[in-house]
Amino acid sequence: MHRIPRAELCAALGLTLFTSAALAHATLDRKEAAPKATYRGVVQINHGCDGSPTNRVSVTIPEGFVGAKPMPKPGWQVTTARGAYARPYPSFHGTVSEGVTAITWSGGTLPDDAVDEFTFFARVADTFAPGTAVYVPVEQDCASGGYRWSEIPAAGQSAQDLKSPAPMVRIVAAQASAAPSVVKAGDLAIETPWLRATPMGATVAGGYVRITNTGTAPDTLTGASIPLARRAAVHSMTMEGGVMKMAPVEGGLTIKPGETVTLKPGGFHLMFEDLTAGPRAGETVTGTLTFARAGTVPVAFSVAPIGAQAPSPAAGEHAHH
Ligand SMILES: [Cu+2]
């Protein structure tokens, strides 16, 4: 087999094809994170160590990424290190002052000529200014050799100039400004559209939303769309002989004047079918709702974790106890 020395391959790709080291090295799949939202950190390991397979990946959780949790990975043991944060952060239940500071996956084997992903979730604190670059150092150890992806570019320097750059994620503006919580469409007020993240391999996803009819004529929700799904339908869910059954709502779901209809788990819902990819917690998925009178309305669905019974709190909507 023709072999290109790995370091040269990285350099060639980095210089000729990519504005950043997108394919080489250790990278983050999601390069933007919003304050007060869940960030899904997907560390991609793109090669081994000069032919040697990777068998340990350790990720340092940056300050301000709160309540980090690893995603278990078949064939790998996961361990976490905990420590004090530099300052306390608000959480759903008061404040948190310590948590997971590093996550290590070990004991697996990732061949040099394959790629794999190591995933964690964390909540992004509201202490970051938009535009801030946050670095996520990664240690990669192979059967023979290893890398420390921990270099941070100095002012005016490009990550491309570094031999072992730390993966970087850019803080963007809080989601609240990007996706208003109430969308007005004619006489309808559409609130908190959300999806539930799906397990690997799932072919359907549930969608939920609250719709209020402020007008004097009824309207009917007849359909919906997201780019991840080929089809969608409005479903009802009913208990029949102790078994939950769902069925398409013939003709769509009518919202009478003055009425608020809430689509939620266990009740009416949007069923997105033939998924081409699963919605992932923390993402925002743009889509549409279609009504008989109000027409097709663009909406942004937030994605809550698998099995969630309610949408993740949006910015400024912390629960009070
Ligand atoms: Cu359904």
Image (cartoon, rainbow, N blue to C red):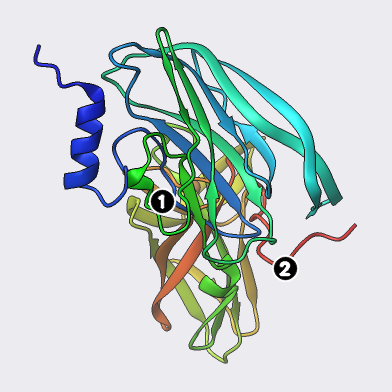
Residue 201 seen from this side: no
The amino acid type, in three-letter code, at marker 1 is Phe
Q: Position of residue 211 (x, y in %)?
A: 58, 73
In this view, the residue farthest toward the left is 2
In the rendered image, residue 230, in percent from the top left (x then y), is placed at: 29, 51
Side of 191 where 44 appears, left or right: left
Q: Which label is found at residue 272?
A: 1
Quarter of image, res 216: bottom right
Is the shortest distance between ligand 1 and the CB of mark 1 under 8 Å?
Answer: no
Mark 2 or mark 1, which is nearer the start of the sequence? 1
Q: Position of residue 110 (x, y in %)?
A: 38, 16
Q: Residues within 10 Å of mark 1 (few under 14, many from 20)?
A: many
Q: Which residue is mark 2?
A: 316
Q: Is mark 2 within 8 Å of ligand 1?
A: no
Q: Amino acid at mark 2?
A: Gly
Tell me if residue 11 comes above or below residue 55 in the rendering: below
For label 1, the SS is: strand
Residue in view at x 57 percent, y 90 percent: 215
Q: Nearer the viewer, residue 312 or 290?
A: 312
